[in-house]
């Protein structure tokens, strides 16, 4: 009897040390297959370099890739600690459709009960968005913005066909602009939510490993 192939790995990419700290403090049990948490550094260029280099490793060549961390909400009524599941991630370099968004929404609601989960396009920027720029991006149909998700997922699919997704935690929003992460209540709330989401990521990954009918 031939041995079963090893499960495809999962690469979880974030930009900041505080995001990596939250993920490392989360529940690391329950994963199917190897999981790597990559800190890419801030900005789209750093994300592109780090993800491309990581996926060049043969051990990760078939990895599913999930971009995560904090984001800025664009829509009125969003609050720090809300979750964003991207239907697509886009920036001037292109657009990437995300896989398994319905499952992610369901599992996030289970992992972090009581938190609002928003779905829609996630747009990329090369700088922190403030004021009028936030309103301008909302008119494009995007519901949230960050600096790395689109670059991460675009880099991932350029290196080979693979499932990708992006889940972000709102750290500031139109009525709740945050100046410094970790010093205000909104930042602390977002940190706690990010710490709790790993089980949802593992369920998403597990669903990709199931045989297709």
Image (cartoon, rainbow, N blue to C red):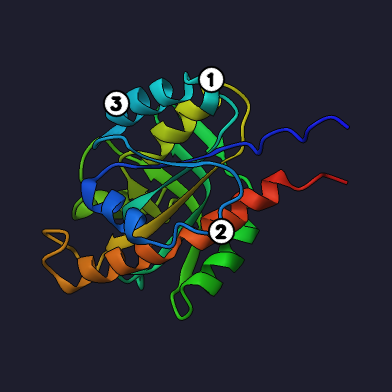
Residue that sits furthest to the front in the current view: 1
Decide: few, some or many residues near mark 2? Use Cα within 10 Å; few <14, some 14-19, many ≥20: few
The residue indicated by pointer 3 is 45
The relative height of residue 158 versus residue 111 in the rendered view (above or below) is above
Residue furthest bottom in the image: 114
Quadrant containing the N terminus is top right
Residue 44: give x, y in percent of width and height.
31, 31
Q: Is residue 69 above or below residue 12?
A: below
- 46 left or right of 180? right
Q: Which mark is in front, 3 or 2?
A: 2
Query: How many C-alpha atoms fall within 10 Å of the one at disc 1: few (<14), some, or many (≥20)?
Result: few
Residue 186: % across, % down: 22, 70
Horizontal side of residue 117 vs 4, given as left or right: left
CA–CA distance between discs 3 and 2?
Answer: 32 Å
Asked if residue 74 can be seen in this view, the reply is: no
Reply above or below: 151 against 160.
below
Does dot 1 land on a helix, a strand or a loop?
A: helix
At horizontal 63% and vertical 36% (from top left) the residue drawn is 8
At x 51%, y 34%, the residue is 95
Determine which residue is flagged by label 1. Answer: 58
Q: Pick the residue in front: 1 or 174.
A: 1
Residue density around tag 3, few if under 14, some if 14–19, many if 20 or more, within 10 Å: some
Estimate the x, y position of residue 77 in percent, counting from the top left: 36, 73
Q: Which residue is mark 2?
A: 30
Sequence order check: which comes first, mark 3 or mark 2? Answer: 2
Element class at badge 3: helix
The numbered mark, 2 or 1, whose residue comes first in the sequence reads 2
- Of helix, strand and loop, which one carries label 2? loop
Label 3 vs label 1: CA separation? 23 Å
Q: Which numbered marker is on residue 109?
A: none
Judging depth in this view, the residue of 146 and 26 nearest the camera is 26
């Amino acid at each position: 009897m031939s041995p079963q192939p090893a499960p495809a790995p999962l690469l979880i990419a974030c930009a900041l040390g505080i995001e990596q700290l939250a993920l490392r403090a989360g529940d690391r049990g329950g994963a199917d297959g190897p999981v790597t948490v990559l800190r890419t550094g801030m900005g789209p260029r750093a994300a592109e370099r780090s993800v491309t280099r990581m996926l060049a490793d043969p051990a990760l060549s078939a990895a599913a890739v999930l971009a995560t961390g904090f984001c800025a909400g664009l829509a009125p009524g969003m609050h720090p600690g809300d979750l964003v599941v991207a239907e697509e991630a886009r920036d001037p370099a292109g657009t990437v459709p995300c896989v398994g968004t319905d499952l992610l929404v369901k599992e996030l609601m289970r992992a972090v009960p009581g938190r609002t989960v928003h779905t829609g396009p996630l747009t990329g920027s090369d700088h922190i968005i403030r004021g009028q720029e936030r309103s301008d991006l909302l008119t494009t149909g995007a519901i949230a913005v960050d600096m790395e998700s689109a670059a991460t997922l675009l880099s991932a699919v350029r290196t080979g066909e693979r499932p990708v997704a992006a889940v972000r935690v709102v750290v500031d929003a139109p009525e709740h602009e945050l100046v410094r992460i970790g010093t205000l209540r909104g930042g602390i709330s977002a940190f706690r939510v990010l710490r709790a989401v790993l089980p949802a990521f593992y369920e998403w990954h597990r669903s990709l490993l199931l045989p297709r009918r």
